Amino acid sequence: MTRTLFSASLVAALGGLLFGFDTAVISGAEGMLQTLFVPEYEAIAARFGDGIFSNSTFWHGVLVASALVGTIVGAIAFARPADRYGRRLVLMWLGSLYLISALGSALAWDAGSFFVFRFIGGLGVGGASVVAPMYVAEIAPARYRGRLVAMVQLNIVLGILLAYLSNYLIAGAGFGVNEWRWMFGVEAVPALAFTLLLLTNPRSPRWLIAQGKTEEAANVLRRVGAGQQGLAAEMESIRASLARATMNLSDRLFQQKYHKPILLAIAIAAFNQLSGINALIYYTRRIFEMAGAEGASALLQSVIIGGTNLVMTMLALLVIDHFGRRKLMLVGSVGYILSLGTTAVAFYMEATGPIILASLVVFIASHALGQGAVIWVFIGEIFPNAVRARGQALGSFVHWVMAATISLTFPLIAEISGAHIFAFYALCMVGQLLWVLFAMPETKGIPLEEIEKKLGIA
């Protein structure tokens, strides 16, 4: 692996780290934000009569979910600019959005301004979820592509852990009422570094060839490891791929022959969030405080959750091609049911915090080993070349819509009963287990063309 390839992939993977950090950082601050903005929530709620919109807790959920609303938009909005202006330039835009969001959220003067700046950060998250893996996949030779794209996923999980650790350290630094501002503001440092370091990265050779910049593309391919003998073949392969992609644009995604992969993608994306994973990531501190832990202790337990997530994600990336997607989903589903069921019972019985911590460690381990590792690999495999990009976009859209829904509703339902919400997630995971047993096909080691036949497409 050449130095240019490694450094360029590492810089692009920092987009994943910012993705994870931005997603999880609010978990340490959302309780303080609720207290701070209660008068504003109540003023908004007072405009409505009876019902969900008259509840100030609902509006707190809206504020927490603001980044996820931006994520939905960002996942759709940045694919076309990446084709027109290049992957590297768009990644620099996304880094600027992270920077604006970090500084703006830290300096927010009311709930409305905070919503806007978190929404901007969400645009960065959504865009990075599409463009960062795209850039790495296009710059890496085939023999390194899998592990380098996986580095983006690993950095997302690392970013979540760093957000929890940062929140814990800031909480112990004595910033008082401004503690939450520092939690958001520290993201400006890696965001600025990411944006500036991208200036050292080469542009995507695939994009360069699409723009007719063949000489620069050839130079990039040499720098990332393409030998002189294989250079012409590599460039011809890219040209042929671009030609096929142009021809395939006329093939509609929503038609009868694609109904099986469409339903599979929607199901796995919806079940991913119906586990309650985003509730845990966004409300980690609150969940442990509900179980009796206090400020610093709750944040320390969040770090344990983030560390478990990182370790199990690393393990999952090592074994996914050995055990297969379906077996990991089966193990993950059983782990979900046991851990969520235990958490619900613990809340019903008003059990101690250590029991809930242990069950949520099992939960995050089950997620990392199952859904967390499988979802994007599986969605990428079940759609044929003609509609793969649009199929992945569909899965991403469903995933982020469900993530926003879960994050929006959690505080409202948890206010009624923490036990009820975890029991609901456990019941949903019983549904996932049945789906895996009776509907999910195994795709491990099967050529993409054979998967098409297996799903009745070819």
Image: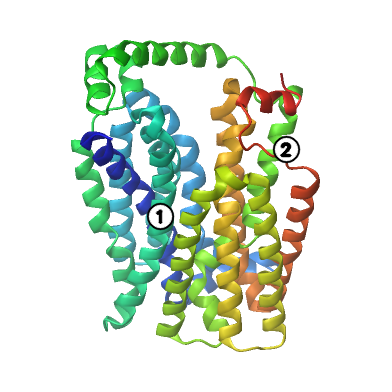
Q: Is residue 226 placed above or below 436 in the rendered structure?
A: above
What's the residue at 71%, 26% (across, down)?
Answer: 258
Q: Amino acid at mark 1?
A: Val
Query: Tag 2 or tag 1, which sits nearer the N-term?
Result: 1
Q: Residues within 10 Å of mark 2 (few under 14, many from 20)?
A: few
Name the residue nearer the viewer: 96 or 49.
96
Please identify the residue farthest to the front as the structure is shown. Answer: 322
**To which quarter of the image does residue 55 belong?**
bottom right
Q: Which residue is mark 1?
A: 116
Q: Is residue 408 placed above or below 175 in the rendered structure?
A: above
Q: Is residue 413 visible?
A: yes
Q: Which mark is residue 203?
A: none
Name the residue nearer the viewer: 88 or 408.
88
What's the residue at 50%, 16% (across, down)?
Answer: 245
Left or right, 160 with respect to 273, comes to left
Q: Position of residue 365 (x, y in %)?
A: 56, 64
Q: Position of residue 311 (x, y in %)?
A: 46, 62
Please report contact status of discs 1 and 2: CB closer than 8 Å, yes or no: no
Q: Amino acid at mark 2?
A: Leu
Q: Which residue is mark 2?
A: 263
**To which quarter of the image does residue 174 belong?**
bottom left
What's the residue at 41%, 14% (across, down)?
Answer: 237
Name the residue nearer the viewer: 241 or 410.
241
Q: Position of residue 426 (x, y in %)?
A: 72, 66
Q: What secondary structure is found at the residue carrying circle 2? A: helix
Q: Residues within 10 Å of mark 1 (few under 14, many from 20)?
A: some
Left or right, 102 with respect to 405, comes to left
Q: Is residue 388 placed above or below 429 in the rendered structure?
A: above
